[in-house]
Image (cartoon, rainbow, N blue to C red):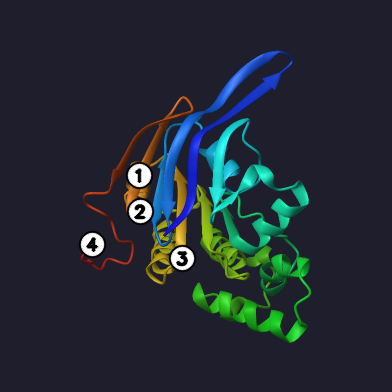
Amino acid sequence: MTLIATKNLEKIYDNDGVRTVGLAQATFSIEVGEFLAIMGPSGSGKSTLMQVLGLLDRATAGDYWLDGKHIAEFSDDELATLRNKKIGFVFQSFNLLPKTSVSDNVELPLLYDNHPEKDNRERVRSALTAVGMQHRANHLSNQLSGGEKQRVAIARALVNDPDIIFADEPTGNLDSKSGLQVMAILQKLNDTGKTVVLVTHETATAEHAKRILLMIDGKIVSDTPVANRKFADGNERTLK
């Protein structure tokens, strides 16, 4: 089943008459349950594509369907609601509130809906358990290591039970051990059926996905399955 589909998607930036192509003629699809890596060097357009797919920005031209819905037909408020219900984000810089507890950071996306407080607490507990951080629930986020902060950020992305998780350079600020722990969590989430889109400039990180979309100068130059997939938990699997 197709979750995301694009046709001739473009993003043009206009700064005082200077036009810069951020995204050019992107046509591809993502199926439910895929683990896709969008890879490319700095300035290749991969973050621009993620922002458009994640409903953080609008395309200049072309078509984008999310779960069968044509995104151009939605107002900004409708996009915000759709984004909160269907999408979870993980960023390189974590984006946690520093002097706020881990639990309160994870609960933030729930504050946009009128969930009962008891329901919120259970959702937060479940999300923290999924990333192995339930024992740090009452700590302040600035008391955590980088790897722990990213795991909390993943829990926050999970708390609304989104259909898709966008992870933008999630290992960029981490040491190799913490980076592998984060990739292991993303792979485990994908194994349970979550669709994961990973943005990275590193080939070794991209090879943890099942498919790599390579971008250069705003264009998709290749779209290929990962032949020798890496598994962050060290266990081999039979690829479907």
Q: For the point 68% across and 78% down, which residue is it?
A: 138
**Residue behind mark 1:** 212
Q: Earlier in the sequence, mark 4 or mark 1?
A: 1
Please determine whether, in this image, residue 114 is positioned above or below residue 168: below
Q: Are marks 1 and 2 in contact (CB under 8 Å)?
A: yes
Specify the amino acid type for callout 4.
Answer: Leu
**Residue behind mark 4:** 239
Left or right of 224 on screen, residue 50: right
**Residue 151 visible in the shown view:** yes
**Nearest to viewer (mark 2 / mark 4):** 4
Report crowding for label 4: few under 14, some 14 to 19, many 20 or more residues within 10 A (C-alpha): few
Q: Earlier in the sequence, mark 2 or mark 4?
A: 2
Label 3: element kind: loop
List x then y, in percent, for residue 10: 55, 30
The residue closer to the viewer here, 13 or 59, is 59
Rendered-image quadrant of the N terminus: bottom left
Give residue 209's mark. 2
The residue closer to the viewer here, 142 or 152, is 152
Q: Quadrant of residue 107?
A: bottom right
Label 1: element kind: strand
**Residue behind mark 3:** 194
